Amino acid sequence: MAKILVVDDAEFLRVRITKMLTSDGHNVVEADNGVNAISQYTSETPDVVLMDITMPEMDGLTAVKEICTKDPQAQIIMLTALGQESIVLDAIKSGAKDFIVKPFEPDRVLGAINKLLN
């Protein structure tokens, strides 16, 4: 299947998403902030990125801008909490392809990933 980079500062959420994706046959790489996300993106060249917005060191919006500057074809899905709509719009303008509101259902995540892969 696909290689997916999961970026979130909450370890429990990375673990939850990783279990869901690996049980669906995907290979998962993790990062806990935007700085590490850029590094992992560069070294691992994932097919899809699931990117949280609010993180320490570098937020998801800044990381999206950096990744999309290096790779305009990057397939990034933002993970957002309710109330972050304006930031999501900035992320979409910067190159993100979709967004998922937390808390989310596994079908929504897998559906968004499959849509980008096809």
Image (cartoon, rainbow, N blue to C red):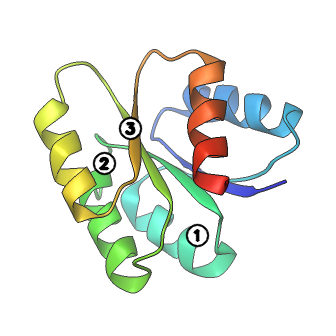
Residue 8: % across, % down: 47, 41
* For marks 2 and 1 on the same chain, the one whose residue lies earlier in the sequence: 1
Q: Which mark is residue 99?
A: 3
Front residue of this view, candidates 86 and 58:
86
Q: Disc 3 residue type?
A: Phe
Looking at the image, residue 81 lies above or below residue 1: above
Q: Which mark is residue 56?
A: 2
Quadrant position of residue 38: bottom left
Q: Disc 1 residue type?
A: Gln
Q: Which mark is residue 101?
A: none
Front residue of this view, candidates 101 and 62:
101
- The residue indicated by pointer 1 is 40
* For marks 3 and 2 on the same chain, the one whose residue lies earlier in the sequence: 2
SS under mark 1: helix
Quadrant position of residue 94: bottom left
Q: Disc 2 residue type?
A: Pro
Distance between mark 3 and mark 1 Cα atoms:
20 Å
How crowded pointer 1 is (Cα within 10 Å; few <14, some 14-19, many 20+) is rated as some
Residue 98: % across, % down: 40, 44
* For marks 3 and 1 on the same chain, the one whose residue lies earlier in the sequence: 1
